[in-house]
Image (cartoon, rainbow, N blue to C red):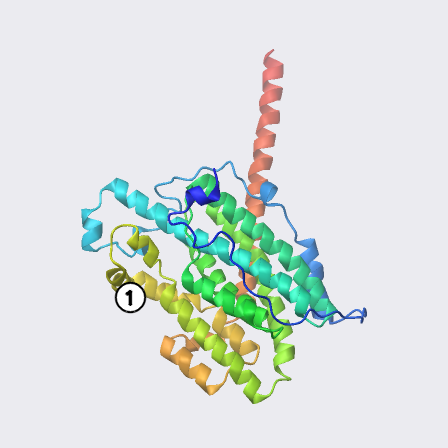
Amino acid sequence: MSTHDLYTTAPDEPVWQVPASGAARFSWDYDDGRERLLALYQKGKDKQWDGDKRIDWSLEVDPADPLGTPDEALTLHGTRHWAKMTERDRGELRKHYTSWQFSQFLHGEQGAMVCAARIVESVPDLDAKFYSATQTMDEARHAEIYARFLHEKIGMLYPVNDHLKGLLGDTLRDSRWDMPYLGMQVLIEGLALAAFGMIRDTTTEPLPKQILAYVMQDEARHVAFGRMALRDYYRQLSDAERREREEFVIEGCYLMRDRLSGVEVLENFGIGKQEAKELSEHSEYLQLFRKLLFSRIVPCVKDIGLWGERLQKAYVDMGVFELGDSSLDLLMAQDEEIAEQLDRDRFAAEERERVAEVADAITRGRAD
């Protein structure tokens, strides 16, 4: 079935064209480059994987409860609308929310792929070009996996959220080579990582857990790459240039905090846009979710040297200022370990099955 047949609402245009700006940069310096970045590049090569083989696509997903997460996480839970819903209606709501979330993940991953390719083109240093090339492949794999999950297991897609699309457009249209790093590696991927982590840690379904854990293992490297590259570059900027980047971060953070709430889902259930916004604003789960969305962004922004007074005030206003002291290295080490543990558990289970099959064959042979 065509993707366009699965959209809840047809996208505004089949192909979104963002005018390119800025220069493509070649480097004739083929020396080894920065040791830390080349080590990350080597890790990027070593950690490539095939989504067809590493993920167990034979696992079933209940369309009426694809994630198995508590209903309290749904904006309508506990409202008059929820009370009127049949169990079938509630199943459809769970399906729509999962479709909306994973659709935004899918569109964001395509954006990340395009931004990584843009970094290969525009970044002046060859070691950064090398790593960005591996990231482009990672993002292509992520988009492939999310698309397959939505097509085969959910059977429904949502168009890209207007505000995510706006941030992607702003990131890609900027001619400065560091902006794809800042917009994608720090803001969009930082928000995505936090969202992935919340679902990974609460879902009771093994297939989405696998998908999210393995994607997050890759993303941990991507954020590390952005931190290294931007930290080195931002030390050289003037105060005015740093303020420009901080303004971009502030605007992007407010945009994502206030707009990525799934209002589109509620509208598909007959709730007007204004009421949908109000319900989202008063959802305790969404308030917690919004705060946790910044658990990866705030410490990264501080780490790369964007920590001016106006930016700090914005984070105080958002209630996330204290997250600046969180350990990104610890969070990313946990992401790595969760993915590796899933592999160990799966391989151990497969080995037990093989041993049992051999033992059964021996027993049957003796009986014959």
Total labels drawn: 1
Where does the image place residue 208, in percent across and percent down from the top left? 47, 47
- Who is closer to the viewer here, 260 or 13? 13
Where does the image place residue 360, in percent across and percent down from the top left? 58, 23
Residue plotted at (66% across, 53% down): 47
Relative vertical location of residue 73 with respect to residue 92 in this rendering, above or below: below
Where does the image place residue 135, in percent across and percent down from the top left? 63, 59
Q: Is residue 11 left or right of residue 141?
A: left
Q: Residues within 10 Å of mark 1 (few under 14, many from 20)?
A: some
Tell me the quadrant of the picture where the C terminus can be found: top right
In the figure, residue 155 lies in which quadrant? top left
Residue 85 seen in this snapshot: yes
Residue plotted at (26% across, 43% down): 89
In the figure, residue 42 lies in which quadrant? bottom right
In the figure, residue 218 lies in which quadrant? bottom right
Which residue is farthest top?
A: 368
Q: Which residue is mark 1?
A: 281
Residue type indicated by callout 1: Glu
Relative vertical location of residue 289 with respect to residue 307 in this rendering, above or below: above
Q: Is residue 329 left or right of residue 131?
A: left
Where does the image place residue 82, in percent across and percent down from the top left? 22, 50
Which residue is farthest bottom?
A: 239
Quick one: SS at disc 1? Answer: helix
